[in-house]
Image: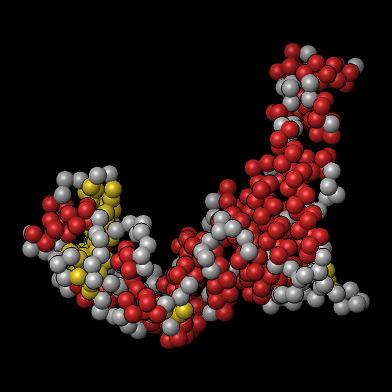
Amino acid sequence: MNMNLPADVSKIINILESNGHEAYAVGGCVRDCILGKVPHDWDITTSALPETVKSYFDRTFDTGIEHGTVTVLLHGVGYEVTTYRVDGKYEDGRHPKEVTFTASLEEDLKRRDFTINAMAYNDSKGLVDLFGGKEDLEAGIIRAVGNPTERFTEDALRMLRALRFSAQLGFEIEPETYKAICELAPTLDRISAERIQVEMVKLVTSDHPERLREVYNTGLSKVFFPELNVMMECEQNNKHHMYTVGEHAIKAMELSPADKVIRLTMMLHDVAKPACKTTDDKGQNHFKMHPVKGAEMARDVLRRLKFDNDTTDKVCNLVKNHDDRPEINERNVRRMIIRVGKENFEDLLAVKRADTLAQSMYHRDEKLAYIDELEQMYKSIIAAGDCLKIKDLQINGKDLIDMGVPQGQRIGEILKAVFDEVVDNPKLNNRDYLLNRVKDMLQ
């Protein structure tokens, strides 16, 4: 089989080979090529020691030299070149205690996680596939290299990676590999929140976000996202619903665009339903105030997984507002845009649509028509350039100081009062009118 290696990758391999070493493209880039995808980055593995690799190239960086990795810079692009290695004992289920270099490609490939990630290629030897990775790729299977229990004991994150790859590629997990994940799931508690977050974002934004269900089925969610377990086990006896809270969230993820903020919102939008659940005398469930409590609970989950503040704030804002259904008129919708933020409103519309489509058929057409109407009103308000922020007012704090208002919170109070009037009637956002209005207020 012939893979078209980029010129720079071939060049690095050729330089190493012509100096008497072995070198191959390895791992994800080989997998992606066989799948017909364009690899994000190219990793190279070699029998040459790191210091030796550095001696052949002008520009290199020690990115992980203690693990045998040197980054070679060619034409402004970095290529990781890593010496064949055997990992020593993993004492903490995270990091090998020491790394031993080896002259054997086979030893290096044996320590990798899944067969589809354990293939190597160069132009002189072709594809080196010692564990049936190509067959597993063609059959759509995620299988651990060698003994799955050993692989997952070395690095517990690999269990979540298996589910993430299955979500990204739409592959099934081979039964022995799956069984080992279920048995070893509790050991994920050794893994840092940051590493878990990276895998979860890839899973949630993949083409198969429903594989989140397997994070629950395998027992992994118990370690870092126990709220999911509660959601999966919470029934909704309510005419608006036909799924458990967890299944509804998964359906909503499948029906929403593959955007990080929107998918995380769909995952968490009803996280507080189990905590807010009440049952009336007809046996119907109600979930009063779940969006407000949901925003708090979502913040806990996202903080636990060390998400950045921007992502966390956006998701919590959408969770808090996902169920708002004001009667549609300009004033209400303007206030809604101000509450949610103009920059988040289109996300909110996507959230509302996905939420509705993941509910029962009860009044579905009316609910969707309402969202369409809300969108039309939003667009016309934006097109009209209505004042939606205090700084969109035709007067500012400096004008008030010039009129003799003392600096301090009084200025904020006056601007807020004027802003409220303008939100109700945008025509009033006229400099002369507003200056006179403030004069009246100061009388």
Q: Residue 222: in sight, yes or no?
A: no
- Which quadrant would the C terminus be assigned to in this image? top right
Q: Residue 431: in sight, yes or no?
A: yes
Q: Is residue 180 left or right of residue 354?
A: left
Q: Is residue 360 left or right of residue 230?
A: right
Q: Residue at x 69, y 70 (%)?
A: 248
Q: Is residue 335 left or right of residue 82?
A: right
Q: Can you say whether 434 is above or below 413 in the image?
A: above
Residue 357, by quadrant, is bottom right
Q: Residue at x 65, y 61 (%)?
A: 266
Residue 240: percent from left, percent from top: 80, 69
The residue nearer to you, when weighing 356 against 310, is 356
Q: Can you say whether 234 is above or below 123 in the image?
A: below
Residue 7: percent from left, percent from top: 22, 53
**How is this picture coloured?**
secondary structure
User: How many numbered dots are placed on residues in this image?
Assistant: 0
Residue 178: percent from left, percent from top: 46, 82
Residue 359: percent from left, percent from top: 74, 68
- Which quadrant would the N terminus be assigned to in this image? bottom left
Q: Can you say whether 344 is above or below 115 in the image?
A: above
Q: Residue at x 75, y 53 (%)?
A: 371
The residue nearer to you, when weighing 424 against 320, is 424
Q: Residue at x 60, y 66 (%)?
A: 254
